[in-house]
Amino acid sequence: MSATEAPSDTPKETPKDGAAFCADLVKTHDFVRYASTLFVPGPERRALLSIYAFNVEISRVHEQVSQPLPGEIRLQWWTDMLAGSGHGGVEGNPVAAELLHTIRNHRLPVSALSRLVEDHQFDLYNDPMPSLAALEGYLDATASALFSLAARVIVRPSEAIEHVARHAGLAQGMTQVITRLARDAARQQLFLPQQFLQQHGSSKEEVFAGRLTPNIRAAVDQLAGEAQTHLATALALLADVPREVRPVFLPLAHVRRELKLMARADSDPFLARPASRLRILWALWRAARTREFGG
């Protein structure tokens, strides 16, 4: 496959089916963000789902290839598409078509979308995440960028919104590193900062063994503490942004619940089960009715 062709496993849909395809993709692979869009008006919801579907496509590339090179080619296709070159197959790729529609209608910064693609190249290799600073940089370009881009669909950008988006992305991303620890370990991948493991006398090999030890638990607790700090900051800053944009940050209600569970003495990231869709919906519905999220 050349970099100018649409990824071969992306179904060919007619343009009118693009919105539905994006919705199904996000519902299947990122239910928390899908659920958060249920609290947003229809036109804006379609735009949000196109952004989130794009993120699903990019973040899942490493799961669909067995070697880095095919993954690099897939990511390059998206980079070329965003740059306006190599548009072969874009019309037949429902996610690309919907994303381009959203970029035009909401004047999204292509640079942020391109950087998201670029930083997900890290996923294709088995290099461990070296430090907290490196993880923060990765999450700034991925999870935080998603919150920022989504917010632009609803209201004009502002420094206050960017501030919330950064902390929200760091909180969500760090929490996901912990909840996905077992899955990543099975793939010999490490997003938990190696810096933390070394500080507590552990190693990536110990994590890859897939069994919780006191050393790993200490490193996980340290990252959870960082996530909790960013979560508290993001929630406090929500009061400074327009009410209509706060539903974009509803995934933080799920992050709050996940961190609460992680704080239990008997929690084990290697045995954790993902929350049910019903529980996620309930958590976000309750949060949406609070003043904190604009209810």
Image (cartoon, rainbow, N blue to C red):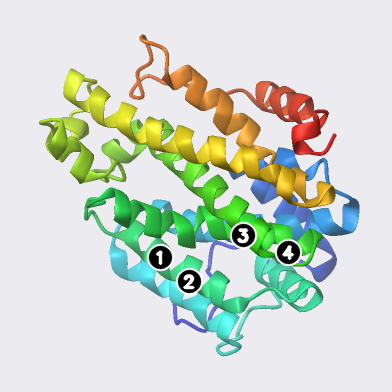
Is residue 32 visible in the rendered structure shown here?
A: no
Residue tagged 2: 115
Question: Do labels 1 and 2 touch, CB within 8 Å?
Answer: yes
Q: Amino acid at mark 1?
A: Asp
Q: Residue at x 78, y 72 (%)?
A: 106
Query: What distance separates the C-alpha of mark 1 from that of mark 2?
Result: 6 Å
Residue tagged 4: 152
Residue 119 is tagged as 1
Residue tagged 3: 162
- Based on the displayed image, in which of its 4 quarters is residue 153 positioned? bottom right
Task: Residue at the far bottom: name it.
Answer: 85
Q: Toward the viewer: 21 or 174?
A: 174
Q: Is residue 295 above or below residue 40?
A: above
**Could you tell me residue 2's position as x and y percent?**
45, 82
Query: What distance separates the C-alpha of mark 4 from that of mark 3?
Result: 10 Å
Tell me the mark number nearer the camera, choosing from 4 and 3. 3
Query: What distance separates the C-alpha of mark 1 from that of mark 4?
Result: 21 Å
Q: Toward the viewer: 33 or 23?
A: 33
Q: Amino acid at mark 2?
A: Arg
